[in-house]
Amino acid sequence: MCKHEAQQGPMSSPETSASFVMICVTIWFIMCLLCPSPLRAQLGTTPNIKHIVVGRCYNYVTLVNPGLRFDCEEIWRQFEAAVVRQSSCNVTVEDYHHMFYAMPQTWPCDRFLFWSKTRTLMQSYAAVLRHFWTLEDTLVGYMFNDLVWCGQDKDSGFDFSSCPKWSACRNHPVYSLWRQASQNFAEMACGNITVLLNGSIVNAFNRKSMFGSVELDSLNPCRVDYVNIKVVTNLEGPFIESCGEGSILDLIQILQSRGFRWTCTDNDQTLMILQCIQNHKPSSCHSCANSFSQRKSVTFS
Ligand SMILES: *[C@@H]1O[C@H](CO)[C@@H](O)[C@H](O)[C@H]1NC(C)=O
Ligand SMILES: *[C@@H]1O[C@H](CO)[C@@H](O)[C@H](O)[C@H]1NC(C)=O
Ligand SMILES: *[C@@H]1O[C@H](CO)[C@@H](O)[C@H](O)[C@H]1NC(C)=O
Protein backbone atom coordinates (compact mmCIF):
# COMPACT_ATOMS: atom_id res chain seq x y z
CA MET A 1 0.00 0.00 0.00
CA CYS A 2 2.86 2.33 0.92
CA LYS A 3 4.62 1.55 -2.34
CA HIS A 4 1.48 2.17 -4.37
CA GLU A 5 1.04 5.63 -2.89
CA ALA A 6 4.67 6.46 -3.48
CA GLN A 7 4.30 5.68 -7.18
CA GLN A 8 1.01 7.51 -7.66
CA GLY A 9 1.59 10.41 -5.32
CA PRO A 10 2.11 13.99 -6.50
CA MET A 11 5.65 14.17 -5.14
CA SER A 12 7.40 11.58 -7.23
CA SER A 13 10.94 12.83 -7.63
CA PRO A 14 13.14 9.72 -7.30
CA GLU A 15 14.71 10.86 -3.98
CA THR A 16 11.37 11.64 -2.37
CA SER A 17 9.83 8.35 -3.47
CA ALA A 18 12.85 6.45 -2.33
CA SER A 19 12.86 8.00 1.11
CA PHE A 20 9.09 7.60 1.37
CA VAL A 21 9.39 3.92 0.58
CA MET A 22 12.21 3.70 3.11
CA ILE A 23 10.03 5.22 5.82
CA CYS A 24 7.18 2.87 4.94
CA VAL A 25 9.45 -0.13 5.03
CA THR A 26 10.83 1.01 8.38
CA ILE A 27 7.36 1.49 9.83
CA TRP A 28 6.29 -1.88 8.47
CA PHE A 29 9.39 -3.45 9.96
CA ILE A 30 8.76 -1.90 13.38
CA MET A 31 5.12 -3.05 13.27
CA CYS A 32 6.24 -6.57 12.48
CA LEU A 33 8.60 -6.50 15.42
CA LEU A 34 5.65 -5.66 17.63
CA CYS A 35 3.16 -8.11 16.22
CA PRO A 36 3.00 -11.61 17.68
CA SER A 37 3.93 -14.50 15.41
CA PRO A 38 2.06 -17.63 16.47
CA LEU A 39 3.64 -19.70 13.72
CA ARG A 40 7.11 -19.35 15.13
CA ALA A 41 6.54 -22.04 17.76
CA GLN A 42 6.35 -24.69 15.03
CA LEU A 43 9.66 -23.67 13.50
CA GLY A 44 13.09 -24.70 14.65
CA THR A 45 15.64 -22.85 16.72
CA THR A 46 15.78 -19.15 15.82
CA PRO A 47 18.52 -18.71 13.19
CA ASN A 48 21.69 -16.98 14.44
CA ILE A 49 20.59 -17.59 18.01
CA LYS A 50 24.11 -17.37 19.38
CA HIS A 51 24.72 -13.96 17.82
CA ILE A 52 21.35 -12.70 18.97
CA VAL A 53 21.68 -13.93 22.55
CA VAL A 54 25.28 -12.85 23.04
CA GLY A 55 24.64 -9.54 21.25
CA ARG A 56 21.59 -8.79 23.41
CA CYS A 57 23.64 -9.64 26.48
CA TYR A 58 26.39 -7.17 25.55
CA ASN A 59 23.77 -4.59 24.66
CA TYR A 60 22.14 -5.05 28.06
CA VAL A 61 25.30 -4.88 30.18
CA THR A 62 26.80 -2.04 28.12
CA LEU A 63 23.86 0.23 27.26
CA VAL A 64 20.62 -0.81 28.96
CA ASN A 65 21.95 -1.46 32.43
CA PRO A 66 25.58 -0.36 32.44
CA GLY A 67 27.66 -1.38 35.39
CA LEU A 68 26.52 -4.99 35.50
CA ARG A 69 29.53 -7.28 35.37
CA PHE A 70 28.31 -10.38 33.64
CA ASP A 71 30.32 -12.65 31.39
CA CYS A 72 28.11 -12.92 28.31
CA GLU A 73 30.22 -15.64 26.71
CA GLU A 74 30.06 -17.73 29.86
CA ILE A 75 26.26 -17.30 30.09
CA TRP A 76 26.00 -18.51 26.48
CA ARG A 77 28.21 -21.52 27.22
CA GLN A 78 26.02 -22.51 30.16
CA PHE A 79 22.87 -22.03 28.09
CA GLU A 80 24.19 -24.10 25.23
CA ALA A 81 25.35 -26.85 27.55
CA ALA A 82 21.92 -27.01 29.20
CA VAL A 83 20.09 -27.30 25.87
CA VAL A 84 22.28 -29.58 23.80
CA ARG A 85 23.19 -31.98 26.58
CA GLN A 86 19.61 -33.29 26.69
CA SER A 87 17.18 -34.56 24.10
CA SER A 88 14.93 -31.84 22.68
CA CYS A 89 11.97 -32.63 24.95
CA ASN A 90 13.88 -33.23 28.17
CA VAL A 91 15.46 -30.00 29.40
CA THR A 92 14.51 -29.37 33.03
CA VAL A 93 14.71 -26.19 35.07
CA GLU A 94 17.65 -27.79 36.91
CA ASP A 95 19.56 -28.01 33.64
CA TYR A 96 19.52 -24.20 33.53
CA HIS A 97 20.75 -23.69 37.08
CA HIS A 98 24.38 -23.12 36.07
CA MET A 99 23.27 -20.51 33.58
CA PHE A 100 21.18 -18.71 36.19
CA TYR A 101 24.06 -18.76 38.66
CA ALA A 102 26.10 -16.87 36.06
CA MET A 103 23.53 -14.04 35.96
CA PRO A 104 22.24 -13.12 39.45
CA GLN A 105 20.15 -9.96 39.48
CA THR A 106 18.20 -7.96 42.04
CA TRP A 107 15.70 -5.16 41.57
CA PRO A 108 14.53 -2.19 43.60
CA CYS A 109 11.20 -2.70 45.36
CA ASP A 110 7.82 -1.30 44.26
CA ARG A 111 8.55 -1.72 40.56
CA PHE A 112 7.55 -5.29 39.76
CA LEU A 113 4.90 -5.70 37.08
CA PHE A 114 3.30 -9.09 36.43
CA TRP A 115 0.85 -9.80 33.65
CA SER A 116 -1.18 -12.52 32.01
CA LYS A 117 -2.83 -12.37 28.57
CA THR A 118 -2.19 -8.62 28.38
CA ARG A 119 1.17 -8.65 26.64
CA THR A 120 0.65 -5.83 24.12
CA LEU A 121 -0.93 -3.52 26.65
CA MET A 122 1.72 -4.42 29.24
CA GLN A 123 4.45 -3.41 26.80
CA SER A 124 3.01 0.04 26.20
CA TYR A 125 2.20 0.46 29.91
CA ALA A 126 5.78 -0.38 30.90
CA ALA A 127 7.12 1.87 28.13
CA VAL A 128 5.02 4.84 29.25
CA LEU A 129 5.39 4.39 33.02
CA ARG A 130 9.10 3.71 32.88
CA HIS A 131 9.00 3.07 36.58
CA PHE A 132 7.86 -0.55 36.06
CA TRP A 133 10.02 -3.61 35.53
CA THR A 134 8.76 -6.77 33.92
CA LEU A 135 10.42 -10.11 33.38
CA GLU A 136 11.43 -8.83 29.93
CA ASP A 137 13.54 -6.14 31.63
CA THR A 138 15.71 -8.65 33.47
CA LEU A 139 18.84 -9.82 31.70
CA VAL A 140 17.50 -13.30 31.07
CA GLY A 141 14.15 -11.97 29.82
CA TYR A 142 15.87 -9.44 27.59
CA MET A 143 18.21 -12.04 26.10
CA PHE A 144 15.67 -14.73 25.31
CA ASN A 145 12.51 -12.74 24.52
CA ASP A 146 10.71 -14.11 21.43
CA LEU A 147 13.38 -16.72 20.68
CA VAL A 148 12.84 -20.43 20.09
CA TRP A 149 15.37 -23.17 20.70
CA CYS A 150 15.74 -26.89 21.14
CA GLY A 151 18.48 -29.47 20.83
CA GLN A 152 18.52 -32.53 18.61
CA ASP A 153 19.70 -35.90 19.82
CA LYS A 154 22.05 -35.76 22.74
CA ASP A 155 25.11 -33.56 22.11
CA SER A 156 24.47 -32.83 18.44
CA GLY A 157 23.75 -29.12 18.67
CA PHE A 158 20.62 -27.04 18.12
CA ASP A 159 17.84 -28.20 15.84
CA PHE A 160 17.27 -25.40 13.33
CA SER A 161 14.63 -27.20 11.29
CA SER A 162 11.92 -27.91 13.86
CA CYS A 163 11.23 -27.78 17.58
CA PRO A 164 8.45 -29.58 19.47
CA LYS A 165 5.43 -27.63 20.72
CA TRP A 166 5.37 -26.77 24.42
CA SER A 167 2.44 -29.11 24.89
CA ALA A 168 4.33 -32.05 23.38
CA CYS A 169 7.00 -32.20 26.12
CA ARG A 170 7.09 -32.66 29.82
CA ASN A 171 10.27 -30.57 29.94
CA HIS A 172 10.32 -28.24 26.97
CA PRO A 173 13.63 -26.32 26.75
CA VAL A 174 11.92 -22.96 26.21
CA TYR A 175 9.26 -23.52 28.85
CA SER A 176 11.79 -24.66 31.46
CA LEU A 177 13.89 -21.53 31.01
CA TRP A 178 10.90 -19.19 31.31
CA ARG A 179 9.59 -21.14 34.25
CA GLN A 180 12.83 -20.69 36.18
CA ALA A 181 13.17 -17.06 35.08
CA SER A 182 9.59 -16.34 36.21
CA GLN A 183 10.17 -18.04 39.53
CA ASN A 184 13.35 -16.05 40.21
CA PHE A 185 11.61 -12.81 39.24
CA ALA A 186 8.66 -13.48 41.55
CA GLU A 187 10.86 -14.56 44.45
CA MET A 188 12.70 -11.22 44.23
CA ALA A 189 9.50 -9.17 44.16
CA CYS A 190 9.14 -6.73 47.05
CA GLY A 191 7.15 -3.69 48.11
CA ASN A 192 4.04 -2.97 46.06
CA ILE A 193 3.64 -5.18 43.04
CA THR A 194 1.23 -4.76 40.15
CA VAL A 195 -0.62 -7.52 38.30
CA LEU A 196 -2.24 -6.76 34.95
CA LEU A 197 -5.07 -9.15 34.02
CA ASN A 198 -7.37 -9.36 30.99
CA GLY A 199 -11.06 -8.92 31.87
CA SER A 200 -12.15 -9.70 28.30
CA ILE A 201 -11.48 -13.42 28.63
CA VAL A 202 -12.83 -16.22 30.77
CA ASN A 203 -10.33 -17.14 33.50
CA ALA A 204 -8.48 -13.84 33.53
CA PHE A 205 -6.68 -15.44 36.45
CA ASN A 206 -5.68 -18.85 35.17
CA ARG A 207 -3.99 -21.35 37.46
CA LYS A 208 -2.27 -22.84 34.39
CA SER A 209 -0.68 -19.56 33.23
CA MET A 210 2.88 -18.68 34.18
CA PHE A 211 1.50 -16.13 36.64
CA GLY A 212 -1.00 -18.57 38.16
CA SER A 213 1.22 -21.63 38.26
CA VAL A 214 4.67 -20.25 39.02
CA GLU A 215 4.82 -16.57 39.91
CA LEU A 216 1.93 -16.39 42.38
CA ASP A 217 3.29 -19.29 44.42
CA SER A 218 6.77 -17.74 44.43
CA LEU A 219 5.68 -14.38 45.83
CA ASN A 220 6.73 -13.91 49.42
CA PRO A 221 4.10 -12.29 51.68
CA CYS A 222 6.87 -11.05 54.00
CA ARG A 223 8.54 -9.11 51.18
CA VAL A 224 5.44 -7.90 49.35
CA ASP A 225 3.45 -5.01 50.89
CA TYR A 226 0.53 -4.89 48.49
CA VAL A 227 -0.55 -6.88 45.45
CA ASN A 228 -2.25 -4.26 43.29
CA ILE A 229 -4.42 -6.08 40.74
CA LYS A 230 -5.55 -4.19 37.65
CA VAL A 231 -8.26 -5.81 35.57
CA VAL A 232 -8.47 -4.29 32.12
CA THR A 233 -10.97 -5.12 29.37
CA ASN A 234 -10.80 -4.32 25.70
CA LEU A 235 -12.51 -0.97 25.06
CA GLU A 236 -15.26 -2.63 23.04
CA GLY A 237 -15.58 -5.64 25.29
CA PRO A 238 -16.40 -8.36 25.90
CA PHE A 239 -16.67 -7.43 29.59
CA ILE A 240 -16.34 -10.84 31.17
CA GLU A 241 -14.38 -10.56 34.39
CA SER A 242 -13.77 -7.83 36.93
CA CYS A 243 -12.61 -7.34 40.51
CA GLY A 244 -16.02 -8.53 41.67
CA GLU A 245 -16.64 -11.52 39.43
CA GLY A 246 -15.07 -14.56 37.85
CA SER A 247 -11.62 -15.98 38.45
CA ILE A 248 -10.29 -12.72 39.96
CA LEU A 249 -12.23 -13.70 43.10
CA ASP A 250 -10.20 -16.93 43.21
CA LEU A 251 -7.00 -14.92 43.00
CA ILE A 252 -8.11 -12.63 45.79
CA GLN A 253 -9.06 -15.64 47.88
CA ILE A 254 -5.58 -17.18 47.41
CA LEU A 255 -3.88 -13.88 48.23
CA GLN A 256 -5.94 -13.49 51.39
CA SER A 257 -5.31 -17.03 52.56
CA ARG A 258 -1.57 -16.49 52.16
CA GLY A 259 -1.66 -13.23 54.12
CA PHE A 260 -1.12 -10.73 51.31
CA ARG A 261 -2.65 -7.28 51.39
CA TRP A 262 -4.22 -6.41 48.07
CA THR A 263 -6.14 -3.87 46.04
CA CYS A 264 -8.11 -4.41 42.85
CA THR A 265 -8.96 -1.80 40.22
CA ASP A 266 -11.22 -2.20 37.20
CA ASN A 267 -10.35 -0.23 34.08
CA ASP A 268 -7.48 1.83 35.42
CA GLN A 269 -7.50 5.25 33.79
CA THR A 270 -3.96 5.12 32.39
CA LEU A 271 -4.60 1.72 30.85
CA MET A 272 -7.81 2.94 29.23
CA ILE A 273 -6.08 5.99 27.77
CA LEU A 274 -3.31 3.81 26.38
CA GLN A 275 -5.91 1.65 24.65
CA CYS A 276 -7.65 4.73 23.25
CA ILE A 277 -4.37 5.91 21.77
CA GLN A 278 -3.79 2.56 20.10
CA ASN A 279 -7.31 2.20 18.79
CA HIS A 280 -8.28 5.49 17.16
CA LYS A 281 -11.88 4.60 16.38
CA PRO A 282 -13.95 7.48 17.79
CA SER A 283 -16.43 5.05 19.34
CA SER A 284 -13.66 3.45 21.38
CA CYS A 285 -12.46 6.72 22.75
CA HIS A 286 -16.02 7.72 23.46
CA SER A 287 -16.58 4.55 25.49
CA CYS A 288 -13.19 5.19 27.01
CA ALA A 289 -14.29 8.61 28.25
CA ASN A 290 -17.51 7.14 29.62
CA SER A 291 -15.75 4.41 31.49
CA PHE A 292 -13.69 6.93 33.46
CA SER A 293 -16.81 8.04 35.24
CA GLN A 294 -17.72 4.43 36.05
CA ARG A 295 -14.28 3.57 37.37
CA LYS A 296 -14.38 1.45 40.48
CA SER A 297 -11.68 0.63 42.95
CA VAL A 298 -11.53 -1.65 45.97
CA THR A 299 -8.86 -1.61 48.65
CA PHE A 300 -8.39 -4.28 51.27
CA SER A 301 -5.73 -4.56 53.92
C1 LIG B 1 15.70 -37.04 30.68
O1 LIG B 1 16.76 -36.55 31.49
C2 LIG B 1 17.01 -37.27 32.66
C3 LIG B 1 18.13 -36.59 33.45
O2 LIG B 1 18.44 -35.34 32.99
C4 LIG B 1 17.39 -38.70 32.30
O3 LIG B 1 17.57 -39.45 33.49
C5 LIG B 1 16.27 -39.31 31.47
O4 LIG B 1 16.67 -40.61 31.03
C6 LIG B 1 15.98 -38.45 30.25
N1 LIG B 1 14.83 -38.99 29.52
C7 LIG B 1 14.78 -39.05 28.20
C8 LIG B 1 13.53 -39.60 27.61
O5 LIG B 1 15.71 -38.68 27.49
C1 LIG C 1 -7.34 -9.88 26.06
O1 LIG C 1 -7.16 -11.12 25.42
C2 LIG C 1 -7.61 -11.13 24.06
C3 LIG C 1 -7.49 -12.56 23.57
O2 LIG C 1 -6.22 -13.08 23.82
C4 LIG C 1 -6.76 -10.15 23.27
O3 LIG C 1 -7.16 -10.13 21.92
C5 LIG C 1 -6.89 -8.77 23.87
O4 LIG C 1 -6.02 -7.86 23.23
C6 LIG C 1 -6.56 -8.79 25.36
N1 LIG C 1 -6.92 -7.50 25.94
C7 LIG C 1 -6.06 -6.75 26.62
C8 LIG C 1 -6.59 -5.51 27.18
O5 LIG C 1 -4.89 -7.06 26.77
C1 LIG D 1 1.34 0.66 48.03
O1 LIG D 1 -0.02 0.39 47.72
C2 LIG D 1 -0.93 0.90 48.67
C3 LIG D 1 -2.31 0.43 48.26
O2 LIG D 1 -2.57 0.75 46.93
C4 LIG D 1 -0.79 2.42 48.72
O3 LIG D 1 -1.66 2.93 49.72
C5 LIG D 1 0.65 2.79 49.06
O4 LIG D 1 0.81 4.20 48.99
C6 LIG D 1 1.60 2.15 48.08
N1 LIG D 1 2.96 2.40 48.48
C7 LIG D 1 3.91 2.73 47.60
C8 LIG D 1 5.29 2.92 48.17
O5 LIG D 1 3.68 2.89 46.42
Image (spheres, rainbow, N blue to C red):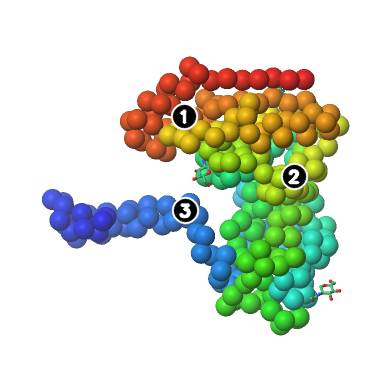
Please provide percent x and percent y for residue 286.
Answer: 37, 25
- Residue 41 sits in quarter: bottom right
Please provide percent x and percent y for residue 292.
Answer: 48, 20
* Residue at (66% x, 40% y) in the render: 205
Q: Residue furthest top?
A: 293
**Residue 109 visible in the current orientation:** yes
Q: Amino acid at mark 2?
A: Glu
Q: Residues within 10 Å of mark 3 (few under 14, many from 20)?
A: few
Q: Amino acid at mark 1?
A: Ile
Of callouts 1 and 2, the N-terminal one = 2
Q: Nearer the viewer, mark 3 or mark 2?
A: 2
The residue closer to the viewer here, 26 or 225, is: 225
Q: Amino acid at mark 3?
A: Cys
Q: Quadrant of the C terminus?
A: top right
Please provide percent x and percent y for residue 48.
Answer: 58, 71
Please count the marks in the image: 3
* Residue at (65% x, 57% y) in the render: 143
Dot 1 falls on a residue whose secondary structure is helix
Dot 2 falls on a residue whose secondary structure is helix
Position of 110 with respect to 235 (left or right) is right
Of callouts 3 and 1, the N-terminal one = 3
**Residue 138 visible in the current orientation:** no
- Residue 264 sits in quarter: top right
Vertical comparison of 58 with 282: above or below: below
Ligand 1, seen in the image, is in the quarter at bottom right
Residue on which disc 2 sits = 215
Which numbered dot is residue 35? 3
Vertical comparison of 187 with 250: above or below: below
The span from disc 3 to disc 2 (Cα, nearest Å) is 25 Å
Of callouts 3 and 2, the N-terminal one = 3
Please provide percent x and percent y for residue 9.
Answer: 16, 52
Which numbered dot is residue 273? 1
